[in-house]
């Protein structure tokens, strides 16, 4: 799968965010992180799940090549050395969710957008709540950076992984609360 680099500090957007029928899970594994265990699943097309915690019905098969590559990239991200993930994605959701998740991939490392700005980038200011709902259903945490979306006043709001994890991720990327600026950019 190819990807397009958005430049220094940007994210790679991977060609291959699919919105067709569900794809069969190829591999599932538990990865360790500074934020606790992560549950990861892949299909033959790419990374399809990256969740905080391990679901009770998880059936680990062990890591495949893609999960091993993701684990390496996550280690580099946690160490502050990686700003651009280059993992193919297989995000499975409605056409609207697909558009919302694609818009998340355009938010550069170390930057934030508001839900209003995200809805505006999608061409529908009335869709703020629908955008927030789609963000909350993001199947691939961290790599698809829904943690970079904040409230209109810059406050931390809504994150399926918990606000403490959202704060950790934003601070890792140099974010400072209440508009105090971004460090290291």
Image: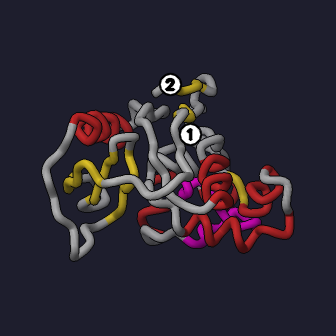
* Label number found at residue 82: none
N-term mark: 1 or 2: 2
Q: Which residue, given by chain and number where applicable, does mark 1 sit on?
A: 109
Residue 104, how many percent across, how many down?
62, 49
Q: Quadrant of the C terminus?
A: top right
Helix, strand or loop at label 1? It is loop
Above or below — where is 88 with respect to 30? above
Above or below — where is 13 with respect to 152? above
Q: Quadrant of the N terminus?
A: top left
Left or right of 147, for residue 172: left
What whole-number distance in Å separates the C-alpha atoms at marks 1 and 2? 20 Å
* Pointer 1 with pointer 2, Cβ within 8 A: no
Residue 153, how many percent across, how many down?
75, 66
Which residues fall within the magenta stretch? 146-158
Q: Is residue 75 visible?
A: no
Foreground residue, 34 or 137? 137
Residue under the image location 66 percent in, 56 percent down:
100
Above or below — where is 55 with respect to 23? below
Residue under the image location 58 percent in, 24 percent down:
5
Above or below — where is 70 with respect to 115? above
**Mark 2 nearby-residue class (10 Å; few <14, some 14–19, many ≥20):** few
């Amino acid at each position: 799968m190819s990807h397009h680099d958005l430049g220094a500090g940007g994210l790679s957007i991977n060609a291959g965010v699919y919105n067709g029928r569900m794809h069969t899970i190829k591999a599932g594994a538990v990865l360790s992180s500074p934020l606790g265990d992560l549950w990861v699943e892949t299909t033959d097309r790419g990374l399809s799940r990256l969740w905080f915690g391990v679901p009770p019905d998880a059936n680990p098969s062990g890591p495949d090549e893609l999960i091993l590559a993701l684990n390496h990239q996550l280690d580099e991200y946690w160490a502050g050395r990686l700003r651009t993930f280059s993992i193919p994605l297989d995000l499975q959701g409605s056409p609207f969710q697909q558009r919302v998740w694609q818009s998340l991939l355009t938010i550069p490392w170390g930057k934030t957008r508001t839900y209003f700005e995200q809805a505006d980038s999608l061409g529908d200011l009335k869709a703020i709540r629908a955008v927030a709902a789609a963000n909350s259903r993001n199947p691939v945490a961290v790599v698809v950076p829904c943690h970079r979306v904040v409230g209109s006043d810059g406050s931390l709001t809504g994150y399926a992984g918990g606000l403490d994890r959202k704060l950790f991720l934003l601070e890792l990327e140099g974010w400072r609360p209440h508009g105090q600026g971004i460090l290291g950019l």
